[in-house]
Every structure is written in C-alpha cells, then in structure tokens.
Amino acid sequence: MSIVKKKYNRHGDKQLTLDQETVKGRTRLLPPNYKAYFGLSDCDVCWNPLRQDGYADCGFWCPYCFARDKTMSLYSAFYDNWTPDMIRPAKVVDMAKDFKKAFDSTRPYKGVIQAMRQGVPFHVGTLTDPFQVRELKEEVTQGFLKLCIEYDHPVVISTKSAIHWFHPKIRKLMLELPKVIVQASITSTDKELSRKLEPKAPSGLTRVKVLEHFKDVGITAVARFQPIIPRINDHLIHATMEDLADRVDLVNIRDYMMSGNKTIRNFWIKEFGVDVYDLLAQSEPLTVEGAQKVYNSEIMTKYMIKIKNLANSLGMKANVDTCYGFMWSDYNHCCGGDGVKGFNPKGEWDLQKVGIFNTANVKYWVKVLLNEGKIDFQRAFKQEPYESRHADIIYSRWFWGTDLKIMGLTQHEAPDPDIVEHEDIVYHFKPNDHFRECQALVDEKVILGEDERLEPEIGYYDV
C-alpha cells in the first residue's frame, strides 16, 4: 500500500499540522523523519536497482526535476503548513539497523536486505541530492558512507554538488570507499544557463572539474548529460562535450525527462520564452506515470547516437541511455561499471536471485535478435530461477508501446511448437527503417552538427 493510501486510511481528508519547536525565541517546523531511505527501483533494466536517498526533499530544487512533483503532491496534500524548502532527513541509526539485518544476521529476508546480501551496489541520490547543503548539518550521507566502508559495500553516487571533493572531511570518506563510482548530471557548462536551470547548485563547469579530480585519483567518473531540452540547451552540446573531453571516464546521454507540473511549464515560458510542453506535444511524447515527460523516442535516439559519436570523436566513451540504447552504447553498465571491482554482475552479484531483472542478459538478447531473428523472453531467464516477475511482464516494461515498433519486434502469428507455453512472449525481429537508420549512424560515425537542434517531428515509422 502506498504512503498516500496509508495516510488517507488513517486521516481521511483531514489536514495535519507539522510540529514546531521554539529555541531562543525562534520557531521552526519539525518535519517527520524520512523512512523510505532504501528501496528497489521499479526500472527492470537498471544495473543498480538498490537505491538510497538520505533526504526526502532536495535543496537544489531544479525546475526540470520530475521528483519535485512527488514531494509537492504528497506532503502539501496532508500538511497545511508544509513548504517546498522543508528538508526531511533520514536517520543513520535506522540505516545501521538494516545493515545489521543484512550482514550480522542469518535470518532470511527478501527485497532490499536480500539485495544488500547479494552485494548489489547502492545507487545514492536517485531522487534527491545526497550532498545538498543540508548535508553539512545533518551528515546523513556521511553516516551512510561510513556503513558502506564498514561493510565493504559498493556505491554509485549521483550528485550535482561539489562538497564531496572540496570538503576535506567528506573527501576523506569518498577516498576510503572500497568500491565507488561518482557521477554528476550536466545540463551544460555555460555559467549563465546553469544559473537559470540550477540556481542553487554549483555550475556545470564546477561539476565537471569535480569529476576530473575524482578521475585523477583513480575513481570512475561519469558525466550524465541530461536532460537534453529542446531550444534550451541543445545549442550548447558541442561546447559541453569539448569541456568534458579527457576529464571523465564515460558520458551517459539520457533522453529528455522533466516534471509535468503546470508551474514548471510556466517557468519555461517566463525564463526562456519557450513552451517546452508544446514542443513535446508536437513530438508525440510518451508520458510516464503521469508526471514525467520524454521526447519522441525515434527522434531522440537518433539525436543521442550523434551525440555519442561526437563524444567518441573527442576520445570519450559514451552510452545511449534509452530502453534499447544499449544496442549502440560503448558500455554495458549505464553508470560506467564495466570492469570496475564490485560492479560486475557476472560472478559478483545476481539480480535474479532477489527478483530483479538481470541486465547481464542484454547482450544475450541482442545476439538472439540479430542471429536468430526472434527472441524468447522465457529462454533468456532460464539461467537462474526468476522470483518476482514473469518474462511477459518484463517484456511489457521494456519493449512497450512505440519502443516495440522502434525495435522492429512483432509477435509471431502461429505458436512455435517448441515454446507453446510461452507463445505470448516470443517475438520476431524484423529491422525497420528506424532501426536501420540508427545502425547506419553508428556505422558511418555521423556526429551531431554544431547547428543541429532537437526539433519536433510528427509520426513514427511503420513496422
């Protein structure tokens, strides 16, 4: 049951009031401590589905952030004195209890605890920034990292901050982590644009310099070039990639995703004179969970492949981070974990044993698709018992809607006698125009033109 349903069942439509305390004549609100600090991602293609967020809210408050809607809609609905700048930290002692359950106990557990025992890396900062300014006071992330050091657990840290390098105490912790990847979201390295898009975060160029420092001391540094926003930062891609050259280990290019909040739509119009939502509508966007907006998959994938080729031409490895972008990515691991100790699922940890789809099978899938012309999803999962989701559900989450057409997958017309029990999850692979165009861009190493923008187009290719 969701948090929203639990609260409604308990309180109905009644508005709650947050507790307050007065110290030396000053009154401040006391938000509840954050309890959902660990969790398993519902993304079935993620190599790091074990997430950690030490704060339920983020002080950076970037206008394009899709996580803002979750906080605003949940807590403003229940607390009449809730404000967007309220930061709710988790308790390190609660996290320590979960570590003890995982590693100091033999009692059987499922979900998060089982994933921890498997050694699945924690992805730190999936919804909120782990090193936002509030961390200097609360030290929640630092307490969590000490637990990872104590229990020798791998982590992938995503942050827009700079204090994890420039703050001596935190940098010392970072360097003591036995298994770590550091990544940062980069919208551009233009200071003026950074000030508009992320006014409370360090500039994009500062984040690049921080990644360079970590790379220089031997820690894998990943720049997540995201989001790509039409008519906002698409004209700065060349300059940004040139600033990243030789300073990071991997550039992960993410498709456009943003908040679906009406207030945010007004932000784009007021600050940039662009109705980004109108562009999305013209591009036939996909809507995920009603709050996130992404660009037309066909347009975006070809655009991202050109950016990937641009990064390659500058001497960098790059990934195309879409549902099927692994076909044209340099790494299997979207966070740059290929070959990094503690981040290789083959032989080190097995996601299928905790009921999560194991993306180590991706290359196997592709081999089946290209060489046999069809894919049997059940066959791909026979290596280990699959506990929580069936293959047909995995299919529906991976190759869904337009992505099915884009991949050139079509359901077979007649049951295969060898796989009658799973006839609904066997698909033929027939490369369509879009697939061939994407492959041609890769083969011919076509890079993004300096004047090439992300403009809306209407329609999809026929299968």
Image (cartoon, rainbow, N blue to C red):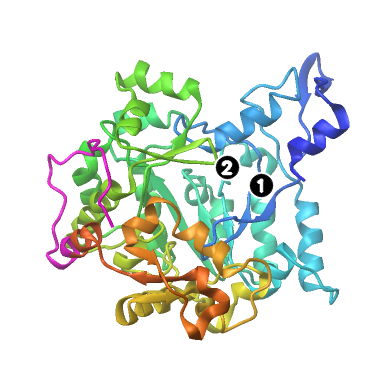
Which image quadrant is residue 249 in? Answer: bottom left
Q: Amino acid at mark 2?
A: Thr
Q: Secondary structure at mark 2?
A: loop
Residue 11 x/y as whole percent = 86, 27
User: What residue is drawn where x is 60% and y is 72%?
Assistant: 351
Q: Residue 437 location in percent, x, y? A: 18, 59
Q: Identify the disc placed on residue 406.
A: none
Horizontally, residue 11 falls left or right of residue 85, namely: right
Check the image and name the residue furthest to the front. Answer: 414
The C terminus, quarter of image: bottom left
Say which residue label 1 marks.
54
Q: Pointer 2 and pointer 1: residues touching (CB < 8 Å)?
A: yes
123 horizontally vs 316: left or right: right
Residue lying farthest to the top in this orientation: 25
**Secondary element type, mark 1:** loop
Residue at image x 64%, y 75%? 386
Residue 291 x/y as whole percent = 52, 35
Q: Quadrant of residue 407?
A: bottom left
Q: Main secondary structure of the magenta part?
A: loop
Whichever of callouts 2 and 1 sits on the residue coming sooner in the sequence is 1
Residue carrying label 2: 128
- For image coordinates 57% across by 71% down, the residue present is 178
Q: Indicate yes or no whether the magenta region holds residue 400.
A: no
Q: Say above or below: 309 vs 227.
A: below
The answer to whether 458 is drawn above or below residue 333 in the figure is above
Question: On screen, 411 above or below 416?
Answer: above
Q: Which residues are magenta?
A: 440-463
For disc 1, the neighbor class at 10 Å (few under 14, some 14 to 19, many from 20) is: many
- Disc 2 crowd rating (10 Å Cα; few below 14, some 14-19, many 20+) is many
Between marks 2 and 1, how big is the CA–CA gap? 8 Å
- Residue type at numbered disc 1: Gly
